[in-house]
Amino acid sequence: MKFSLHIFDVLHGDSFLIRTPQDKIGIIDCHRNGTFIPVLEYIQKNNLREIDFICLTHPHSDHYWGMLELIDHCIENGIIIRRFLDAGITPKELDARFLKNGADYFAELYERIVQSSRHDFLHLQECRDGTEVLREPNFVIKALAPHSKTIRKIIAEKFKYQERILNQKFNHFSIVLLIETEEHCILLLSDSEITDQKIIAQRNHSLKKRITVFKLSHHGSQHNYYRLLTEEFRNDNKRYAAISTGCDYGTPSLEAIRHLGSLNIPIYSTNCLDFTNVLYDDEPIDGTITELNDAIFTNTEDVPEPQKIIPYHGDITFEFDDDQIKVATETGREPIVS
């Protein structure tokens, strides 16, 4: 049984595509890389004519800034979208302070989605903890978060929070997806907070032992990295960690990288590892965690350009074939190892 997970390099953002064993297409978030929308190019290049679902994990602009163009392209070119999944939160329930400069785009995106649903172009589906997104023989995609109680509490109290706190609170709306087969367990954490991940771990006791591919939450931020979720990870050549990042906010954290390295988990990162005050030569260096640690220095005057900070894997594809996993990257670089 074969299926694949594609993680596109969209700098600081998320954009994923799943091809199921029955060749159904699922899109999870859609962000840009500059003016370029990688998932849209994939659709065009592969001449896809039907998308089973598009899922917006939560309404932060680095997860939807490109989704309007994606939907418009499908409408204009007769590409079928079966379903649009979100956490069931309408734009009216969101505070304008949270949406910031993405408010107009977000409003237009949802106007298009609502119009499309009224014309039966797509079906709107709420996706929260317990929602089964897709099922095929020995293959299921289901949501482990967000939790309805958490959403209700934040919506009710949103006017109490300052902008910075409110922005962080909305990460609790993140749809966490689990892709599960007999042989594999892929966990996509979106931007979920540690408290959400604790609930997931408590409700799914066997999950930690079964994970084969683990997409770190919030681009590898240390504030969203729950160590106990990975405490039973041990590398047996069948476990991998993936990070979707772009070095705008100091992600991923060195602490998360070190911890995964201590578990001997190979790590793939779409863009760079933005360790502040790390000095590299003119040419990017492929290095181990030890070598990265050795590169840290105290002179803060010469912070490297983003394109000189590595590892940089670009687009990452995980191909699953029965119990085997094959990883292909845009740059061909090896994973980060301890």
Image (cartoon, rainbow, N blue to C red):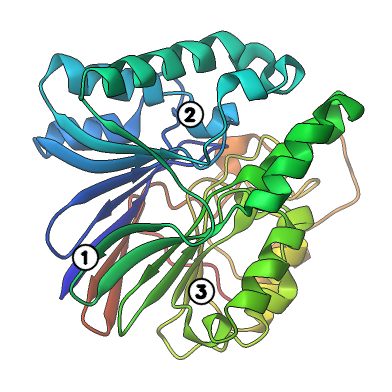
Query: The disc labelled 1 sits on which kind of residue?
Result: Phe
Query: The disc labelled 2 sits on which kind of residue?
Result: Tyr
Q: Position of residue 316 (x, y in %)?
A: 37, 54
Secondary structure type for disc 3? loop
Name the residue beneath numbered marker 3: 266
Foreground: disc 3 or disc 2: 2
Secondary structure type for disc 2? helix
Secondary structure type for disc 1? strand
Q: Compare marks 1 and 2 and give the one earlier in the sequence.
A: 1
Spatial distance from mark 1 to mark 3, Cα to Cα?
21 Å
Q: Position of residue 168 (x, y in %)?
A: 77, 39
Residue 109 lies, with reference to residue 171, above or below; the image says: above
Q: Left or right? Give the position of 215 relative to 253.
A: left
Rendered residue at 91%/50% (across/down) = 298
Density class for disc 1 (Cα within 10 Å; few <14, some 14-19, many ≥20) is: some
Q: Left or right? Give the position of 154 relative to 16.
A: right
Towards the viewer: 148 or 229: 148
Residue 154 can be seen, yes or no: yes
Query: The disc labelled 3 sits on which kind of residue?
Result: Pro
Question: Where is the C terminus found, in terms of image quarters?
Answer: bottom right
Name the residue beneath numbered marker 2: 64
Name the residue beneath numbered marker 1: 3
Q: Position of residue 2 (x, y in %)?
A: 17, 70
Foreground: disc 1 or disc 3: 1
The quadrant in which residue 299 appears is top right
Rendered residue at 52%/49% (across/down) = 244
Towards the viewer: 265 or 173: 173
Spatial distance from mark 1 to mark 2, Cα to Cα?
25 Å
Q: How many marks?
A: 3
Residue 291 can be seen, yes or no: no
The quadrant in which residue 8 appears is top left
Q: Compare marks 3 and 2 and give the one earlier in the sequence.
A: 2
